[in-house]
Image: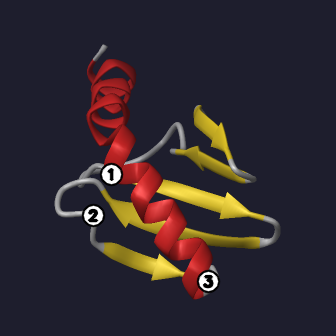
Amino acid sequence: MPTLLLQDGFKFFFYANEHESKHIHVMKGGNFAKIELSGLRVSKNYLRPAELKKALAIVKNYREEFERRWDEYFQG
């Protein structure tokens, strides 16, 4: 499970056996969300609304890096 970023109590990661489309899992405490990198679409969410909003802002800021790291890991 490659961890991409730890910030503001969030853990951003993907699983080693992931599949397309490119997406990121986000955990905070015992809650989590799954965010598609293309379009920042939330496909699963168990975060509180304010946490999800913050997580989406972070993913937006790091999206290019997350996509690059996904490509390096799975195509590398």
Q: Say whether marks 1 and 2 touch (CB < 8 Å).
A: yes
Q: Is residue 7 left or right of residue 45?
A: right
Q: Is residue 37 left or right of residue 31?
A: left
Q: Is residue 1 visible?
A: no
Residue that badge 3 annotates: 46
Q: Which mark is residue 47?
A: none
Mark in the foreground, 1 or 2: 1
Q: Earlier in the sequence, mark 1 or mark 2?
A: 2
Q: Is residue 46 left or right of residue 68?
A: right
Residue that badge 1 annotates: 60
Marks 1 and 2, Cα distance to the nearest angstrom? 7 Å
Q: Say whether marks 3 and 1 touch (CB < 8 Å).
A: no
Q: Earlier in the sequence, mark 3 or mark 1?
A: 3
The image position of residue 16, as x and y in percent, is 52, 37
Q: Amino acid at mark 3?
A: Tyr
Q: Would you call the spot at circle 2 few (<14 residues within 10 Å), some (14-19), or many (20 or more)? A: some
Q: Amino acid at mark 1?
A: Lys
| Residue located 52% across and 65% down the image | 54
Q: Is residue 61 visible?
A: yes
Element carrying mark 1: helix
Quadrant showing the C terminus: top left
Quadrant showing the N terminus: top right
| Residue located 63% across and 70% down the image | 32
Q: Which mark is residue 40?
A: 2
| Residue located 34% across and 29% down the image | 65
Element carrying mark 3: loop
Observer-nearest of 6 and 73:
6
Marks 3 and 1, Cα distance to the nearest angstrom? 19 Å
Q: Would you call the spot at circle 3 few (<14 residues within 10 Å), some (14-19), or many (20 or more)? A: some
